[in-house]
Amino acid sequence: MRVRVATTALGITAALLALPACSTDTTGTKHQTSSSSRTGKPSGAVQNPAALSSAALGSRLLDQSDLGSGYLPKAERPAQHDDVTVIGCPALSELGGEAATGGMLAFPHKAKAKFTYGNSSSEISEELYSDSAKKLSDGIGRIFDAMTGCPTYQVVAGGTPVDVTSQKLPAPQRGDERWSQLLTFVAEGRSTVVKQTAIRDGSLVLVVSGAPALVDRHLDKALAKATATS
């Protein structure tokens, strides 16, 4: 089945395609908050604190001083509007229309930072989004379920076929809800491995993506700064 959707429909996938190859490291520490459950769903009533502004989210992103030496900011690429063809993944195909264009990157309050590490091609990016707990839960869950629902599929972006393998990972027990996955992209003989973990804490969602070792290293630090109340 071939379904054509705007690049924004797979904004998260399109962004990952540009990340460099890296090896897997899943040694992150785990703990469980009082509002967490092992199923990844809230154990109590869902709270709906006021959404944070984009400016407020921006101030909660990690910066070079938080990350340590060897990290350099990386400018965002201009938005792409070319069509993307998804082959062999009905779950992603069903995201078309409003669900697709209103996915993770379309929340009204958001901020993002991206860094490269040392002389290597490793990268890490952090995204923060804020909205009602229900909208965040529904939107993020729908996208992750679609992306991990197909073990293998193909994305044709700009005429270049990219073979994608997705693997759902156990998410660290943080926040109210959490999701994690490992994505492998193969294009023109080159392989790219990306780990991505998302955590919802009330009306805020943190998404950390990039080289698996870097994601594991900085996830807790990113969450602590993103959810700090002072």
Image (spheres, rainbow, N blue to C red):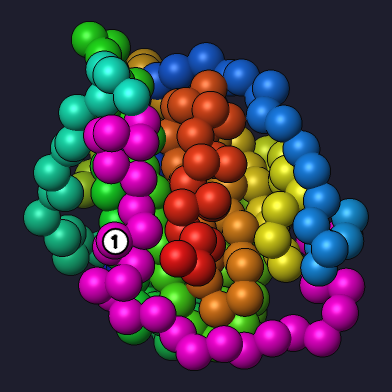
Q: Is residue 118 left or right of residue 212?
A: left
Query: Which quarter shows the C terminus?
Result: bottom left
Q: Is residue 192 above or below residue 74?
A: above
The answer to whether residue 6 is above or below residue 30 is below
Name the residue type under label 1: Ser
Magenta span main SS: loop
Residue 156 visible in the picture:
no
Q: Nearer the viewer, residue 94 or 126?
A: 126
Q: Residue at x 33, y 24 (%)?
A: 68
- Say if residue 114 shows up in the picture: yes
Q: Residue at x 54, y 51 (%)?
A: 224
Q: Residue beneath label 1, please?
A: 59
Rendered residue at 45%/18% (across/down):
22
Q: Residue at x 60, y 36 (%)?
A: 182
User: Magenta residues?
Assistant: 39-67
| Image position, residue 16 (x, y; %) | 38, 42
Count how many numbered circles sit on residues in the image.
1
Q: Secondary structure at mark 1?
A: loop
| Residue found at the very far top of the displayed protein | 119
Residue 183 in the image: state x and y as whole percent.
55, 37
Relative to 86, 149 lies left or right: right
Location of residue 66 in the rendering, given as x and y in whole percent from the top left corner = 35, 36
Whether residue 66 appears in magenta in the rendering, the answer is yes
User: In front: 5, or 2?
Assistant: 5
Mark 1 residue crowding within 10 angstroms, few (<14) / some (14–19) / many (20+): few
Relative height, residue 80 to residue 119 (above, below): below
Could you tell whether 142 is left or right of 4 in the image? right
Which of 140/131 is in front?
Answer: 131
Quarter of the picture holding the N terminus = bottom right
